[in-house]
Amino acid sequence: MNHTPVEGFSKLSKEGKIEWLVNEYLNGSEKSIQTLKQYWNDDADLQRLHDEFSENTLSNFYMPFGFAPNFLIDGELQCLPMAIEESSVVAAASKAAKFWINRGGFKTKILSKVKLGHVHFMFGGDKEKLDRFFLETVLAKLFIDTEPITKNMQARGGGILNLKLVDKTEDIPDYYQIHAEFDTVDSMGANFINSCLEQFAQTLKREVYESDVFTSEEKDSLQIVMCILTNYTPDCLVRAEVSCPVEDLAEGNVSSEMFVEKFTRAVRIAEVEPYRATTHNKGIMNGIDAVVIATGNDFRAVEACAHTYASKDGKYSSLTHCEVKDGVFRFWLDLPISLGTVGGLTSLHPLVKLALEVLGNPNAEKLMGIVAVGGLAQNFAALRSLVTTGIQQGHMKMHLLNILNQLEATEEEKEYFVNYFKDKTVSHHGVISEFCNLRGVKSVEELKK
Ligand code: MEV
């Protein structure tokens, strides 16, 4: 089907946008209009708030908002807010939390907290001259010119930590950077960093143009390419870990030694094998993203950073590691992550505010630890299942309701199936076949008639 481009879509009213969308892409279906509108909030102010988070908002997209209790983190009992659609994630987190609550709980540690940004620029002149000029003339002015931007941040204990000129001409001819390090305290700091960077670029340009150090060709060769923070923050790093004596790790009919051997082997495989590392880390991100979204942070930034870090040694690898030393099993996650507990959605979205309140309104450092624990717990739960019962037993149990909802099962039928599969492994085929039995039909197609 051919569609016609639309002019000024963002300027249409919400009703106008829906009308256009439904006529152009949904055959004018009244049902589609109803589907979009049934997720509107009755509270007009609340709806407006959500509409204004983003452009061209036509409805709200629900995501399950669950809680995983019993997380003992640095001696404090926490209940983790998790926004995630995957059926087994909150259950797995809760299971891991319960497992570790009697084994010392989770410990966290901030290893460093530096955020980064760059002015990427081209300069075709003398390198040594630029180097000297940057150190002797530009550097101090970069700090002075950004004072109006950094004043408030400094009052909160943050600001610009360090600035340096980086020669990248071996990668791309004439390419340089101002590499800038920041402490943004409890904010993620994207706007702060980008504003500083844009000022750095102006200052650099002004100083070069006004100086009598460079020739006019050198001056003309200076071109600012872009000013932007990097989401790769390897020095904004938190460690979450668990440890306990090996003998505390017996698992059903698997001895503690056997469990540790299998578990350790699974982590080693993820350390050396990118195919496995990707899925291993995906499981970690299940826990991380869920808490990051629930607390109003930018999960795309968190994902991008984590995966770059996982490749830092030249090969994509596991984000978690484990060891056994002197009879003690230790399992940990080093996670670079830039989070905010002020600014952004944190004070706007009512559910985010609630989530942060449940966590005791943590500062950014504490939230970094909590989020890392979410990832470590998830990975522990996944590996524990994978090396013992297999993942499908628990996973499919949680998926059962999705299959039954697809089949449009009644509440009584759902209850029947939960009981039916109590001591059996759930499979898609098994559910369909028993469902047909129950309804007295031969196939799902017959149900639809
Ligand atoms: C599923 O979302 C995540 C797992 O595949 C993670 C893993 O394999 O470690 C279970």
Image (tube, helix red, strand yellow):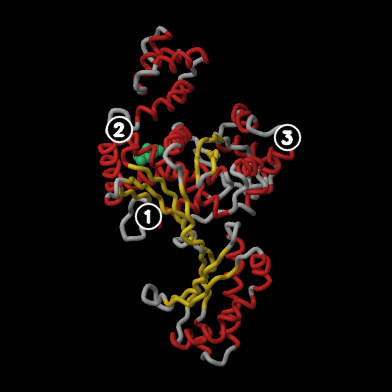
Horizontal side, residue 289 vs residue 279: left or right: right
Give the percent coordinates (x, y) of residue 171: 37, 73
According to the image, label 3 marks what residue? 43
According to the image, label 1 marks what residue? 310
Marks 1 and 2, how far apart at CA: 26 Å
Horizontal side, residue 9 vs residue 382: left or right: right
Give the percent coordinates (x, y) of residue 326: 29, 49
Q: Is residue 50 visible?
A: yes
Give the percent coordinates (x, y) of residue 422: 40, 18
Q: Residues within 10 Å of mark 2 (few under 14, many from 20)?
A: some
Horizontal side, residue 100 vs residue 272: left or right: right
**Residues marked 1 and 3 touching at CB (< 8 Å):** no
Number of the front mark, 2 or 3: 2
The number of discs equals 3
According to the image, label 2 marks what residue? 388
Q: Residues within 10 Å of mark 3 (few under 14, many from 20)?
A: few
377 relative to 169, above or below: above
Give the percent coordinates (x, y) of residue 385: 34, 34
**Type of the residue with mark 2:** Thr
- In the rendered image, the quadrant that contains the C terminus is top left
